[in-house]
Image (tube, rainbow, N blue to C red):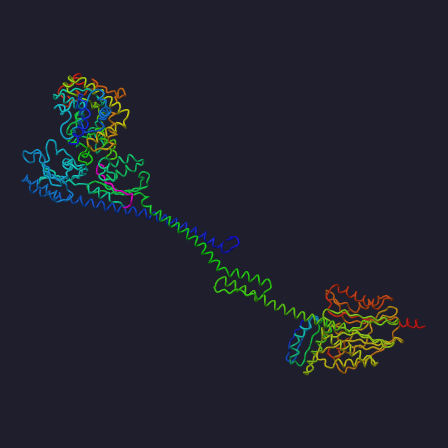
Amino acid sequence: MKRILIGIVILLIPFLMKGQEIITFMPQWTPQTQFAGYYVAMEKGYYEEEGISVILDHFGGSSTGTAIERLQHGKADIITSQLVTAMIAREKGLRLVNVLQTSQVNGLMCAAHFPIQSPQSLDSARVGRWKVGFGEICDLFCYKNGLNVNWIPYIQGINLYVSGAVDALLCYSYSEFILLELATGGIPRENVICFRDYGLNYPEDGLYVTEKYYRTHTEAVEKFVRASKRGWDYARMHPDEALDISMRIIQMFNVATNKILQKRMLEETLRLQINPVTGKADYAPVRREVLDDMNASLREAGHLNKDIKYEELIR
Amino acid sequence: MNVTINEEGAKALVKLEGRLDTTNADQFMKDITPLMNGSHTEIEMDCTEMEYTSSQGLRMFLMLQKTVSSRGAKLVLKNMKPHVKEVFDITGFSHIINIL
Amino acid sequence: MNFKKSFSSRLSLYVLLVSASLMIVLTLLLSLIATAVLRKNAIEKAELTLNNTVLEIEKVITEVERSVDNLDWVVQQNLGNEEFMYEVTREMVSANPNVIGSAVAFEPGFYKGRSYFAPYSYIGDVSGELHTIQLGNENYDYPLLDWYQIPKLLGHAYWSEPYYDDGGGGQRMSTYSMPLTDENGEFFGILTADLSLEWMSDMVSAIKPYEDSYTFIIGRNAAYIAHPDNEKVLNETIFTSAMAMTDTIAFEIGRDMLAGNRDMRRFMNDDAASFIVYGPLSNGWSVALICSYEDVFGMAMAVIMLIIFFLILGLVALFFGSRSIIRRMTTPIVQFGNAAMTIAKGNFNASIPEVYSKDEIRTLRNSLAYMQRSINTYIDELKTTTASNERYESELNIAREIQSSMLPHNFPIRSDLDLYAEVQPAKEVGGDLYDFLVVGDSVFFLVGDVSGKGVPAALFMAITRAAFRFIGALGLPMAEVMSRVNFSLCDGNQNNMFVTIFAGRLDLKTGEMEYCNAGHNPIVIVDPAGKASFLRAKPNLAAGLLENFPYEDEHMKLESGSRLILYTDGVTEAEREDKAQFGEQALLEWAAGLSETISSKGAAHDLNAHVKMFTAGADQNDDITIMAIHYLKNNNTKNQE
């Protein structure tokens, strides 16, 4: 905790000097290349060029609370979040809006100690999922297939799986799954499923601000979005440099990690940003049909009572 | 000259075959040594197969005759071929040696 | 060192080649064996080291597990006393040197009204003092943390994956968590002990059976717990290293280690041929030791180089050593060669070097010495034989000397007498003689043949001639002459030698001939008309045998122009190859064929030629004597008138 604060202060100094508009940006997890584009934009001064100062606040996101909660409490101005999570939060009352959609493809997976021949294989299984969330897609999956899963909530990591305490583990293709590969030397393909293959290919990461903030800081938000896009584009063109920049920031926050994980995470993150329709990373906003589909599924599963209106959510 | 000596008690029967000349005179001398040194009372020499003798051979017979006579024994040469006897005659040895 | 010429150099070169080949083969074999043994030893050593490492770590692990086990009982006994739990954790930390923290975390709601109750003691690594706190709160939702949840789910004790301690100091730690169950088997909490792993990395880095070998430990999630490269610890897994390597064996090794197996594998560690031994720890971690072969064999290579150096040195020494030994041992052969050469050059008494060994060289020496002796003996015999031959030869020469000195060569030159005589002596002089003496108008002549050969016969001949010369000159009748000569010859004649003689006296005026034959061959008379016949005289007895033999002489009258041919049996008994003899008949025929005018000399030569022609090269084994007398009274009378 101490280290994160120190890190923030260090990052803050140049911006404090300039007295520009300060935006607190809070990614939804601990520092990793999942957020490489933003790091690049910061390092390369794209935000500066846009005339805004950005505070990078990685609060951790592992033990308590989420970025959304922070947003709600005004502890952050812009956050990253998953679409599903945002939808559910909005329904609960937090009026947030999507200003940038980076992720185009769903990356949630489930890895098991046994072959998952059909969704039924997971019935009654102990499956680990994060306490803070991120498992909604899987809820939809279970609902769709009438599965009764024994959820084991945990904070983070893959030890639940590795120790054999759970039968299967939810993981993201760009983080936990890579860790699993590095920890086991390779999980047999038949033991793994991707939820996007089961009709749940809902986009994930994007940038969110409160409606109020958007109204009052529209220009700043747009600048932030523009610079962030530039950052992501640059990272796409220069992945090695992006990796180095990210590693510096990660080490600054004193987070234990290894370069190979970060490298592969960056690769996978960039890959998930490619629009399957156009084949390009074009930050295409969520399509209406997709949102409708998500609304329907969530409603069915009981996560939503009311549809989220497109216009309200997507900017 | 082949000399074959057979003894019948005190009598020696000697058969002479071949030639007696200077080349085998010494051998003849050796062959008749048992007669010279023996104690035969009578020595009969069968000269049927005696082909020839030289003057050297005559000497041998003479020596034998003298030795045999000195111990009182008798020497007789029998059945001599004519041309051989002629040598004995010419040299007058017939007078000295008994030839039958 | 001329190899072609020097036996010892060639031999020692062959010895060298054979030994060198043998030694090279042996060295190669030895090297192979040594390498294999070294490899095996290295692996065994590595395994031993690994086992020791494992045991050391196990000791600590077991100690912690046991402590926690013991405290489990304590906790169970004092469940009613919440505050006591703090004491439990303090006890755990203070009693164990490696335990730097301990907690008793209860399931939310176990103690009424307490959703979080986790007494926790730890050693602050800055102060080193023991602190005790209550761990659980909203920010520290321990029921969902791995150290709580996993053993709870597993239902048994669990060693956590090593992690860096947040509290401060950044120590590597692992937490041993044991689930607590009540008498009904219901789970109600977790008892933990935090084990610092710093000692482990220290220990591991000190383990170096070979200079470049190193040890690493991985956890159940394949992450390095201990590694010489500190960067890797907890940051990388064995598979991240494997991905950097081209050989997929690293993946296999990693998986095998995770599976809790123990094994030894060979692999290429960044181009260095190496081997790895690994084995599991009881808590699911795995220890591995890597050694490079270069390390292992480094010294061995040096040793092998040294061996090869000494081998070459040894071979050189062998060559010179064996050459000198061989040279020394074959010196006798060289000496034999020299001795043989000396002997061959004529020094038959050259000394042959002595040999003291009992081998083939000794045999050679003995053969050489024996050969020398044989040569000497043979030469001595040869000398003796030659000497005796020479003596013999000289004897023959003496006999021949005597004979030829006895034979007169000054034949009378008279118109009424043509007398010629000659002797062809045989190799071994046969004792033939002739003689003649002209006294006034009488000619006294004789031809004789001594029995025997050699010097005795020649001497006998000399005596005979001397006797005749002396007695014949007395003018006595021939019978008397012969008797007296006989008497002389019998005197002292032990050898039974005798001589056949035909002697005669011819009165040249009257032609009256008085003659006496003593056992000699009948002479040939050729009358003036050329008719030849034998004069059959009384044989009497050869002279020298009976002292008082009464010799009788005879008389006849020769016509002028008559020839007398006197001879010895060397003529009539002359043999050709097939032993056929010339014979009396051939003599008669020859005499009949004489021409009227031929001289006595010519006649004698002619008869000789005839005999020679008859014998046709066969050896002459007796003297050939011929005397030819031609009586020519009328010639003389005519001249006188």
Q: Nearer the viewer, residue C226 or A176?
A: C226
**Magenta span:** C209-223
Which residue extends farthest right? C641
Q: Nearer the viewer, residue B21 or C469?
A: C469
Q: Residue A201's x, y, as percent?
A: 22, 23
State yes or no: residue C210 in magenta.
yes
Q: Nearer the viewer, residue C543 or A88?
A: A88
Position of A101 compared to C110: left or right? Answer: right
Q: Is residue C528 visible?
A: yes
Q: Residue C87's x, y, as percent?
A: 8, 41
Position of C343 compared to A37: left or right? Answer: right
Position of C560 compared to C97: left or right? Answer: right
Q: Residue C163's x, y, as percent?
A: 19, 36
Choose top left, top right, bottom left or bottom right for residue C78: top left
Asked if residue B82 is positioned above or below residue A261 in the image, the reply reads below
Quarter in which the C terminus of chain C is drawn: bottom right
Residue occupying the point 25% across, 37% down:
C238
Q: Is residue A173 visible?
A: no
Position of A126 compared to B39: left or right? Answer: left
Choose top left, top right, bottom left or bottom right for residue A160: top left
Q: Nearer the viewer, residue B28 or A67?
A: A67
Asked if residue C478 is positioned above or below residue C354 in the image, the reply reads below
